[in-house]
Image: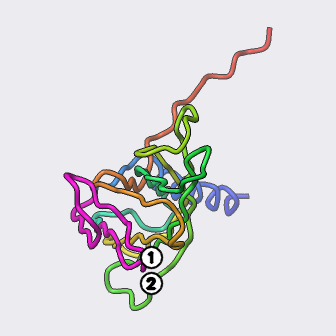
Amino acid sequence: MPRLFGVLAMLVGISVASVGQIVEAEAFSCTGAEEGSRCWLSSPRLTDRVTWRFTNVPTGAALPLVLEGVANDICGTCEWGRDVLVRLYYRAGGDLYWQRAELWLRNVSPEPSGCLFAYPVRGETRILPTGPTIEIVVQRVLSCDPHVGFSRSSLSLGSIPPTVTPVPVPT
């Protein structure tokens, strides 16, 4: 029985370690077209990429990763701004190999209005950092997908602790 409580305490500790801390990007770089604070991934050859570098990343638990951007759908026949498929590459400092994940950035515009320019897109996943420093690279996957723009604050790593709603006592 004490072993069960030890395992449960460890799991709760790991879960709490990954919740409640948002890690801010230390560095941001872009090989795409820069317009103001935005980096646009628009190359038809899919060579554009954006890179974030984070330090002081908690390890030992999966961290939520939220990627938000702005898309321009240049399709002439669309009725609604399309989702964008991007590929994430990430590795901790000192790792020899990159991890890879595909992520759909969904159109989160509140209302449809024909072909949209500068409509918001958002995607979420979880990554398992293996070290306190992590580098994350994002590229478009399909040349026919909308162009997408990111800024330094587009990528969030970690999360805000959830608010606890008290359960009403039955009467």
Kind of residue at disc 1: Tyr
- How far apart are the two marked residues, 2 and 1, measured between alpha carbons? 6 Å
The residue pinned by badge 2 equals 98
Q: Nearer the viewer, residue 26 or 15?
A: 26
Q: Quadrant of the C terminus?
A: top right
Q: Of helix, strand and loop, which one carries label 2?
A: loop
Task: Give the quarter of the figure containing the N terminus.
Answer: bottom right
Secondary element at tag 1: strand
Residue 161's place in the image compared with 41, above or below, is above
Amino acid of disc 2? Trp
Where does the image place residue 40, in percent across and percent down from the top left? 33, 61
Q: Position of residue 67 (x, y in %)?
A: 44, 55
Q: Are marks 2 and 1 in contact (CB under 8 Å)?
A: yes
Residue 136 versus residue 14 in the image, above or below: below
Q: Quadrant of residue 53?
A: bottom left
Q: Nearer the viewer, residue 36 or 131?
A: 36
Identified at 64% across, 56% down, the residue is 8
Magenta segment, which residues? 25-52
Comparing 54 with 111, the one in front is: 111
Look at 29% across and 54% down and name the residue there. 151
Question: Which callout, 2 or 1, points at the residue further toward the start of the chain?
Answer: 1
User: Circle 1 sits on which residue?
Assistant: 89
